[in-house]
Image (spheres, grey):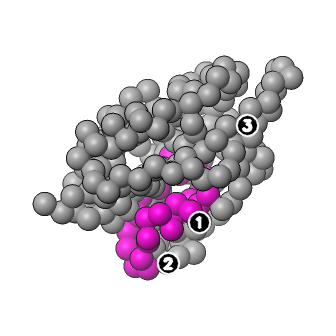
Amino acid sequence: MSSKNYFDSVSDQWDTIRQTFFSDSIREKLCEAAQVKEGSTAVDIGAGTGFVTQELLNRKLRVIAIDQSKEMLNVLEQKFGSSGAITCIQADAYTLPLESESVDYVMANMFLHHVEKPGQAILEMTRILKPGGKLVIADLDRHDYEFLRKEQFDVWLGFERSDIKKWFAEANLSNIKIEDLNEQCCCDSCESCSSAAINIFIASAEKSSI
């Protein structure tokens, strides 16, 4: 089973499953790190069933929710309707169907560790940002919980923060900040007695206006 197939299969249960992993405060911290402004346009990459999208809508932003799983997006649309404030697009991380320099913010929560080529995905996220726009990512620190590869189809067992900083720099992003969220992602194995408790970081940066 691929990552896409996994998320297709759990789409109707994802909101309940997700609540056991991390708290709602993460989406608030993503918005605070981006310093989002009402009326702006934000892209939620790996939007799933709308965890981050909900906070962006609450703050009166226009949202473009992107996910490779149509089933997840279907749940998102059922939750938030078809108002003019939200657009749902099925796409992968490497070929976002948006014009260059067209959005104010790009956010990705717990998405990057499902991507085979994180550096390439970050370049593509940066491409669609307006000059002065902000990219904010929340994800997992490097860990050794191998069961997550098999059970949740994680491609990466978290990241070294130095690698995140390198990929941001290679995308010519500035004002790079990587901070500890003082929160852990917790998950129990379905097939063993293993339990994961992994530190979460938040990385933010700005696209140069030059």
How many numbered marks are there?
A: 3
Residue underneath mark 1: 28
Residue drawn 30% across and 63% down?
133
Q: Quadrant of residue 28?
A: bottom right
The residue carrying pointer 2 sits among few (fewer than 14), some (14 to 19) or many (20 or more) residues within 10 Å by Cα, namely: some
Residue drawn 50% across and 32% down?
159
> Disc 3 or disc 2, which is closer to the eye?
3
Q: Earlier in the sequence, mark 3 or mark 2?
A: 2
In the shown orientation, is residue 67 left or right of residue 182? left
Residue drawn 22% across and 62% down?
131
- The residue furthest left is 210
Instruction: Classify mark 1: helix, strand or loop.
Output: helix
The residue carrying pointer 3 sits among few (fewer than 14), some (14 to 19) or many (20 or more) residues within 10 Å by Cα, namely: some
Residue 101 spot, x, y in % from top left: 23, 59
Numbered range of the magenta stretch: 26-53
Residue 87 spot, x, y in % from top left: 44, 62
Residue underneath mark 3: 197
In the shown orientation, is residue 199 left or right of residue 97? right
Q: Earlier in the sequence, mark 1 or mark 2?
A: 1
Q: CA distance from mark 3 to mark 2?
A: 33 Å
In the shown orientation, is residue 88 left or right of residue 201? left
Looking at numbered disc 1 in the image, what kind of residue is underneath it?
Answer: Glu
Let me know if residue 33 appears in the view.
yes
Residue 136 spot, x, y in % from top left: 44, 54
> Disc 1 or disc 2, which is closer to the eye?
1
The residue carrying pointer 1 sits among few (fewer than 14), some (14 to 19) or many (20 or more) residues within 10 Å by Cα, namely: few
Q: CA distance from mark 1 to mark 2?
A: 14 Å
